Amino acid sequence: MRLSSCLSAGALLLLASTANAYTVFVSNEKDNTVSVIDSTTLEVTKTIKVGQRPRGIVLARNGEWLLICASDDNVVQVFDTKTLEFVKNLPSGPDPELFTLHPKGNPLYVANEDDNIVTVVDIEKGSVLSEIPVGVEPEGMGISPDGTILVNTSETTNMAHFIDTQSNKTVDHVLVDARPRYAQFTPDGSQVWVSSEIGGTVSVIDVKTRKAIGKVSFQINGVNADAIQPVGVRITRDGKTAFVALGPANRVAVIDTATLKVERYLLVGQRVWQLAFTPDEKLLFTTNGTSNDVSIIDVEKLRVTKSVKVGRYPWGVAIAPF
């Protein structure tokens, strides 16, 4: 009886230890690689050769596929997340930088920086469904939780473009601060947060009225204002806390979404770019472009616990639940 109890306890411990094991994928822009990190050991387990200048990455097919913007190859590459083998190329339009997947898993919306369009791609058929004209140098891509509204940011036009996903038509344009880089919807879909790299702010836009209702600014002791360049944004599932990567300021800002006040700045690696939560939201991974590493943040304790060396100029990060 005691042996059986010990075995049961051991099995439970094993399940507990594996339940929160994730695979972290980091695109390395200058190395043309993706680093694969085990979230339990926090070590790089493999490095995959991919296309030229990989930037945006996202998971598809319930985590079976890793999609990569191979910007200088003008394609979106698909890799199998278990075997790490190349699957196929998807048409993307020229210079794909960032993309977002419809909540139902298809289609994919790709920002084409050189052509000022958003390309809509069927990831199963590998075909282009539509091309949507937007502003100059489109980059940021966010989609509402119900999949009805797509927001693209144009770096040079300084706008957030609202697109109806049924018609694939632009329905509104909202002016934001200089060089908007990222768009992130709140979990309830009521707001979209748009980071402006040169403006040094994050604009909070009401999705229903498509009006800016607030703005987050940043001040860090000992850091010049022009070094504070917001890029990646992530918001917790409960909608209470936002994390914003501040580029050359080498900080991640922790923001109370109700008050739009910065609660804390977390020191990470150099030129922090993008962010991703583990599925349980216990850890937040940041890509640090010029220190060639990722930082790991304990979300509950709001503390940086470790950095992991990856390839040159880590850019995007995506995390699979296995």
Image (cartoon, grey):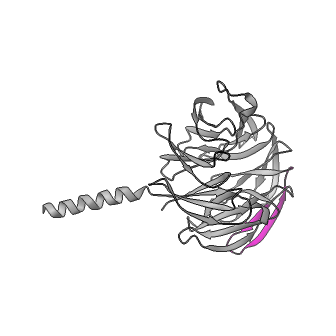
Q: Most extreme residue toward the top, as rendered? A: 221
Who's the residue at 60% across and 48% down the image? 293
Which quadrant holds residue 190? top right
Residue 169 figure quarter: bottom right
Q: Main secondary structure of the magenta part?
A: strand
- Image quadrant where residue 88 sits: bottom right
Q: Which residue lies most toward the left here?
A: 1
Percent x, y of residue 314: 65, 52
Q: Position of residue 145 (x, y in %)?
A: 63, 52
In the displayed structure, 195 sits above or below 51; it is above
Q: Position of residue 45 (x, y in %)?
A: 51, 61
Please name whichever residue, 118 or 84, is drawn nearer the observer in this view of the structure: 84
Is residue 308 in sight in this rendering? yes
Does 260 lie within the magenta span?
no
The correct choice, above or below, for 158 with respect to 142 in the image is above
Q: Going 78% across and 53% down the picture, which residue do you hit?
A: 163
* The residue stretch that appears in magenta: 119-136
- Closer-to-camera residue (127/88): 88
Q: Is residue 134 left or right of residue 182?
A: right
Q: Residue at x 46, y 39 (%)?
A: 300
Quadrant showing the N terminus: bottom left
